[in-house]
Amino acid sequence: MSLEERKRCARAGAGKKVDVTPKRTVKERLRSFVADGPLDLVAGAVVLINAAFLIIEHQNRGEVAEKVLFSYPVSPEDVDRPRLFEIMEYVFLAFYVCETLLRMVVLRTMWYYTAEGGIMWGNFFDALIVAFGVSDVLIQKVMLPQEGQTHFGAVLLRLLKVMKVAKTMRLIRVMQLFSQLRSMVDTFLASLSSLFWSMVMLLVCMMIAALVLCESCVPYIVDPTADIEMSTREWLLIRYGSFTRAMYTMFEITFSGGWPGLIRPLVDEVSVLFAIPCLIYVVAIVFAALRLITALFALRQRQVLNSDAAAAVLERMERASELQGKLLEVFAHADVDGDGYLTLQEFEALLQQSEILHYLSVLELDIRDARVLFHILADGDETLSVEEFCGGIAKVRGNAKSVDIVQLMHETGKLRKECRAMLEAFGAQVLS
């Protein structure tokens, strides 16, 4: 700060300060708005509002469909889409287009690639959703305004309407704004390969079981001499009459948890021998394999959380901030005169309180000699400031860290060299 600015501050008073920080340009502010997170917060809020409008619109469409169904063949009059939803759709689409273009222009190469994150697939995903929305407007309103009456136009418009709902997939990006949700999303994405191979293994097992049951059940369906009722034959045909039906039944047995209702009729009304392969499948796949896959996913989640540097830094900062606040409360409790410093007497009186000792033991701080600890924290002074108290407690708590041991060995080595040099100099003087 220059002399003129100091004089200005003195005239303004002690309570006023002059802002001498350099002002950022509009380009720098815009880049900070895009790259540092504020735009993500705004976009997340807009996506949530858009999802709320979609929920309300589809609820309204369900009510309209109910009216059409119960008034058939007479068509109700108010079946058109409300104008408000159409206007809001264009507003949200315009925001998404502007947001995507703004990110591309401001971030440039960082929009699609960064050294830390590699290829930014999330940005490509957002751009693809925006492209779907723009193509929907162009095709529905410009290219095919009257094609809804033809079969091709009706099918195409239905596909486009389904593609509209894809914009709600942006909610996945909103989860990245919250640390816990981001950890869950990262864990899920990191587990996709494990999920794929787990499903391959389960599908192979289900295919084998489906072939075995299909091969075993078809003779009971077509054999007129078998002592089985017609209702049971129909049930067997629906559940195990072909490979696709048996495969879907095995899918239900594996994942729905309702396997007794799908196996019990086989055992009770067809043959008790069906209990052998069915129970083997339930024990080996439904019980053992699914729990093994769950354990592997839990292990993968722990690995992802341990490797999440950002989450680890945030957690460490939160713990440090919480420890700082608690130590400040302890210091304020011990500072009887309120001068911002602790004397040896105040420090000893503090450590005589059982509650404080218990709290410091929770912080992994074993205090055996208050006087020694005071001089260590005060660094030779007669008083202990709040900075020395908080910083010193944070350093001496817990076990010795590797860096502390290395630093101690380094200082010991330097001291040894100095002592050797002093002995050599003293010996030279004695000899001379």
Image (cartoon, helix red, strand yellow):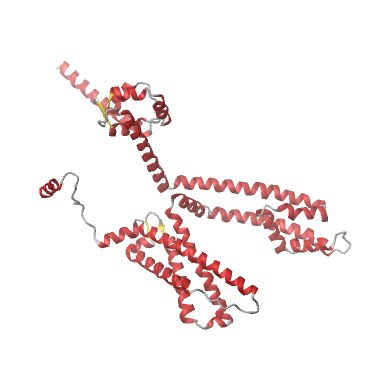
User: In the picture provided, is 275 more to the left or to the right than 24?
Assistant: right
Give residue 74's position: percent from left, percent from top.
63, 79
Residue 189 visible somewhere in the drawing: yes
Q: Nearer the viewer, residue 108 or 14?
A: 14
Instruction: Residue at 21% x, 22% y: name it.
Output: 422
Instruction: Residue at 18% x, 50% y: name it.
Output: 18
User: In the picture provided, is 404 more to the left or to the right than 189?
Assistant: left
Write down the quadrant of residue 354 in the picture. Answer: top left
Residue at far top of view: 430
> In the rendered view of the protein, which quadrant contains the C terminus?
top left
Q: Nearer the viewer, residue 40 or 11?
A: 11
Give residue 186's position: percent from left, percent from top.
48, 53
Give residue 234's position: percent from left, percent from top.
79, 64
Q: Nearer the viewer, residue 178 or 119?
A: 178
Give residue 61's position: percent from left, percent from top.
56, 70
Q: Is residue 299 above or below residue 168?
A: above
